[in-house]
Amino acid sequence: MATTPEPLSLDSLISIDALLTDEERMIRDTVRRFVRERYLPRAAELFAKEQFATDLIPELAAMGLLGGSLTGYGCAGMNSVAYGLAVQELEYGDSGLRSFVSVQGSLAMWPIWKYGSEEQKQRFLPKMAAAEIIGCFGLTEPDSGSDPGSMTTRARTDGDHYVLNGTKMWITSAPVAHLAVVWAKVDDGGPESIRGFIVERGMPGFETPTIHGKMSLRASPTGEIVLTDVRVPKASMLPNVMGLKGPLGCLTQARFGISWGALGAARACYDAALAYARTRVQFDKPIASKQLIQEQLVEMAMEIAKGQIMALHYGRLKDTSGISPIQVSLCKKNNVAWALKIARTARGILGGNGILLDYPVVRHMLNLESVYTYEGTNEVHTLILGNALTGHNAF
């Protein structure tokens, strides 16, 4: 009697291991083991209860994942591919887990590392790498999302302080953060007056109310930043950048990680759909033997492979000649859009079971709805690429 052969794994299909260094493989495998042993057994419960696994933060720090791609100041100094592989494994667990690491490293630590004074770097970065200080990033506002230049948060000069007023919205890690890198216009100026400020927990007028009722990224702490006459010392301003270049530079770093992370969510959905299709029997046969199901699984695997190869290529370029924000937009747009489509396709393969938290698919599908929007919506990345390719600005 013929036996069903073992399926070809995605790793074998894509075969990037030969292109990775020993260290890159070690980092990937270490994070993969952590996610499977420490996070996945709790993933559905955390999502259902709208809880973040705060107890795992010290382990994330011990693996060097907080500010992992930064050098010096207690940071791990991973290359771009190693970091990408790490966050890909984190998002195999949950987008909220990867989001925490992305925000800490790319949006809170990176601006201090890139734009901060030496005193600011020495004071904050080692403790942030060790998870003694958790950070968040305050850019988006209730009425200012895709157009950050229209922000209404203001910093008024008052002696040796700035007085900050405004509200930031959809801020990952805000409820648990010890500090926020907040972007504001100084003295009612225009977009070029935008500056970054390190605002610390405990400063009077600084509040971070939690946003409840999310149906996406439920295992990620999300809140607002409310600034009411917050007095921030002038020494807390990031001295080495002004204008939108500052926050947009941070977003480019975060988008690079997202382009890898989304592939982790896509892989989790593919793995679940494949395993289900091989064991779900209808009309006396596993549904994996049906042509329509095979077509869907093939397309899923094909797009994950293409996304992985793109991410690896841009990761290598980032560490050698460098990559442009436009290339990062291409990678983020492609990989996130396909990850969401793969999640929806996997949900269909699982049928009614696809909406149960017993399986990871609906959780990833709902999470990816946010990933599709944050760090630049899919439409914004389309216009960034359209502007670059045609020379005409459609914003």
Image (tube, helix red, strand yellow):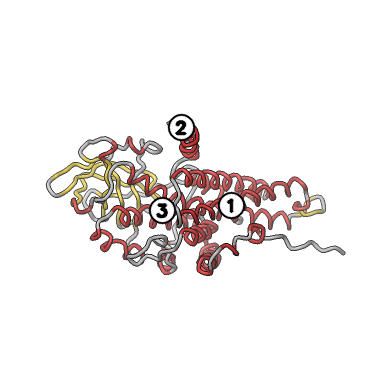
The answer to whether residue 3 is above or below residue 265 is below
Query: Closer to the observer: label 2 or label 3?
Result: 2
Looking at the picture, which amino acid does disc 1 mark? Answer: Ala
Q: List x then y, in percent, for residue 61.
A: 40, 66
Q: Nearer the viewer, residue 268 or 356?
A: 268
Q: Nearer the viewer, residue 261 or 289?
A: 261
**Crowding at label 2, few (<14), some or many (≥20) Cα neighbours within 10 Å?**
few
Query: Closer to the observer: label 2 or label 1?
Result: 2
**Which residue, given by chain and number where applicable, does mark 2 sit on?**
391
Q: Marks 3 and 2: in contact by CB < 8 Å? A: no
Considering the numbered disc 1 on the image, is that residue within a helix, a strand or a loop?
Answer: helix
Q: Residue at x 46, y 43 (%)?
A: 326
Considering the numbered disc 2 on the image, is that residue within a helix, a strand or a loop?
Answer: loop
The answer to whether residue 350 is above or below residue 121 is above
N-terminal of the two: label 3 or label 1?
3
Q: List x then y, in percent, for residue 168.
A: 33, 43
Looking at the picture, which amino acid does disc 3 mark? Answer: Pro
N-terminal of the two: label 2 or label 1?
1
- Relative horizontal placement of residue 262, taking residue 135 as reference (left or right): right
The answer to which quarter of the image holds residue 360 is bottom right
- Relative horizontal placement of residue 332, taking residue 105 as reference (left or right): right
Residue 266: assigned label: 1
- Relative horizontal placement of residue 51, taking residue 302 as reference (left or right): left
Answer yes or no: is residue 197 visible. yes
Q: Residue furthest right?
A: 1
Query: Count of labels shown?
Result: 3
Looking at the picture, which amino acid does disc 2 mark? Answer: Gly
Answer yes or no: is residue 48 visible. no
N-terminal of the two: label 2 or label 3?
3
Q: List x then y, in percent, for residue 140.
A: 36, 42
Q: Residue at x 37, y 52 (%)?
A: 107
**Which residue, given by chain and number where applicable, does mark 3 sit on?**
221
